[in-house]
């Protein structure tokens, strides 16, 4: 779904406290991969807890366009009848990945080793994001990309009819690029090897092993044996730690809050925010720690309390890359300075997230500093003036971050478009309301 509808300006009413239990939807990364790997297996994969956010629904449509049968049985319950590795057929129309970088980049990897052409597009945000980071390694397999200047979408990828396996050292810390190369490698003969410069989320490796592929990880080097037969799976998608971040952080900054967020996936390649919050002194506990579907899971309990600014180490960036916008909000309300380094990847997300947070926080009365690769927020010890309108720039995480800020500011913070939360967290507003938040809708 592209964000082409009418924008919906809204604001949170400041001063509420959050209490109760938050049921978080399924993990976005695992949901995309469940659909894609299911479509490449032979037979029926069953998925429960699939995130029904716009990004994932676009990937579901794409899998159908490539020849898999994708059926929705009820809320979060889906099945995919896969066509087997190498079994996709040429789509009849352009594939629109909406707002989803993960969707388009993983799909490009998937079709790069099929001997037909696919044209991809997306919304204005996705059309502005760099795709060369994926088409460069895919060219090594023999795929040829023709995109707009700077390799941007719309882009046509002519897949390699006789692909060769590759060795590729990924120059940026990106699970999307790593995954695109591994997905392409699935339909190439022999070993495809990917070397990372930093460990990024490892859902692709874990899930491919679950589907029966031979994937070996040795430090930062991942080796995949090509042309496996993938066996259909029954997948229970863990709840998304990146979405859980919003009610957790809102509870930490809103006086009188006490929130339980059950069953959150805490894969170490995803859990950096929670380590950081604890270092800031947050009243955040992990209860009932357990394993579900091969992933570590816990119930998170977050209570309001004072927090202090810290230096977030750059080596933690990959494990919390989508959480820096909401961390910046927590930092604005904490006491003291928070410095985030090694974060230049934030500049190529749905928006330039350093710029979007910097301009929005400044408009709300918070002092910030930025370099190309770092972001510093001067905390105001709970007293952020607010009283501004912020631009969400087609970016769900920017919108949800400023909703949370506006619950704790002295004056309301107006968000120029609330519709973008559909991307990853369609029930964000009702879920927050159930716990005590209230929101006002404004006329454009
Ligand atoms: O592989 C994935 O599912 C994702 C990887 C990350 O992107 P990069 O690979 O660009 O860092 C992250 O920001 C995105 O939300 C999901
Ligand atoms: C960066 C994100 O997603 P994507 O790259 O898939 O658009 C995100 O969800 O924060």
Image (cartoon, helix red, strand yellow):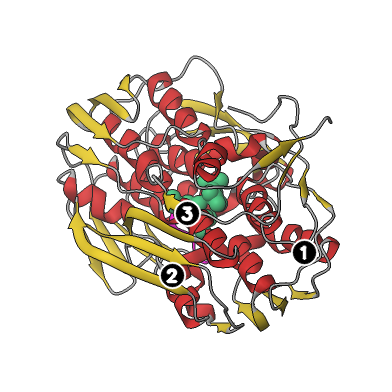
**Which residues fall within the magenta stretch?**
171-175
How crowded pointer 2 is (Cα within 10 Å; few <14, some 14-19, many 20+) is rated as many
What is the distance, in whole Å, between disc 1 and disc 3 at their CAs? 26 Å
284 displayed left or right of 164? right
Is residue 275 in the magenta section? no
What is the secondary structure assignment of the residue under circle 3?
strand
Q: Position of residue 437 (x, y in %)?
A: 59, 47
Q: Is residue 90 above or below residue 276?
A: above
Spatial separation of the CA atoms under disc 2 and disc 3: 19 Å
Q: Residue furthest front?
A: 256
Verify CB contact (< 8 Å) between mark 2 and mark 3.
no
**Residue 306 image point, x, y percent:** 57, 78
Mark 3 Cα-neighbour bin, 10 Å: few <14, some 14–19, many ≥20: some
Rendered view: 207 above or below 113 = below
Label 2 CB-ligand 1 distance < 8 A = no
User: Is residue 136 in sight in this rendering?
Assistant: no
Nearer to me, 257 or 109: 257
Label 2 residue SS: helix
Name the residue carrying label 3: 19
* Residue corresponding to mark 2: 274
Circle nearer the N terminus (2, 3): 3
Q: Quadrant of the N terminus?
A: top right
Of labels 2 and 3, the one closer to you: 3
């Amino acid at each position: 779904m592209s964000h082409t509808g009418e924008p919906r300006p809204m604001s949170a009413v400041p001063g509420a406290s959050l209490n109760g239990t938050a049921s978080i939807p399924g993990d976005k990364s695992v949901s995309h991969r469940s659909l894609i790997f299911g479509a490449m297996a032979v037979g029926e994969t069953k998925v429960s807890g699939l995130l029904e956010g716009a990004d994932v629904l676009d990937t579901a449509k794409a899998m159908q366009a490539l020849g898999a049968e994708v059926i929705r049985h009820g809320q979060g319950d889906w099945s995919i009848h896969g066509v087997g590795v190498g079994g996709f057929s040429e789509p009849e129309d352009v594939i629109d990945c909406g707002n989803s970088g993960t969707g388009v980049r993983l799909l490009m990897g998937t079709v790069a080793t099929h001997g037909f052409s696919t044209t991809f597009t997306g919304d204005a945000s996705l059309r502005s994001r760099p795709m060369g980071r994926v088409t460069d390694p895919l060219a090594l397999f023999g795929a040829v990309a023709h995109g707009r200047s700077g390799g941007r979408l719309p882009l046509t990828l002519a897949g390699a009819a006789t692909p060769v396996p590759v060795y590729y050292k990924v120059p940026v810390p990106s699970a999307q690029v790593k995954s695109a190369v591994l997905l392409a490698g699935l339909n190439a003969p022999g070993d495809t090897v990917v070397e990372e410069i930093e460990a990024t989320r490892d859902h692709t490796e874990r899930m491919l092993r679950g589907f029966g592929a031979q994937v070996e990880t040795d430090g930062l080097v991942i080796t995949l044996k090509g042309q496996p037969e993938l066996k259909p799976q029954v997948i229970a998608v863990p709840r998304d730690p990146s979405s859980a971040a919003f009610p957790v952080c809102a509870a930490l900054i809103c006086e009188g809050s006490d929130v339980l967020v059950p069953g959150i996936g805490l894969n170490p390649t995803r859990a950096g925010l929670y380590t950081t919050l604890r270092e800031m002194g947050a009243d955040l506990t992990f209860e009932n720690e357990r394993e579900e579907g091969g992933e570590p899971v816990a119930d998170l309990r977050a209570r309001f309390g004072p927090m202090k600014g810290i230096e977030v180490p750059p080596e933690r960036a990959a494990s919390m890359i989508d959480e820096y916008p909401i961390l910046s909000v927590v930092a604005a309300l904490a006491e003291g300075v928070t410095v985030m380094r090694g974060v230049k990847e934030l500049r190529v997300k749905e928006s330039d997230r350093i710029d979007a947070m910097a301009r929005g926080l400044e408009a709300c009365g918070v002092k910030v500093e930025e370099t190309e690769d770092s972001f510093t927020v001067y905390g105001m010890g709970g007293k952020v003036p607010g009283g501004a309108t912020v631009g969400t720039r087609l970016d769900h995480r920017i919108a949800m971050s400023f909703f949370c800020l506006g619950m704790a500011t002295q004056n309301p913070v107006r968000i120029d478009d609330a519709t973008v939360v559909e991307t990853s967290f369609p029930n964000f507003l009702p879920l927050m309301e159930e716990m005590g938040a209230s929101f006002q809708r404004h006329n454009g």
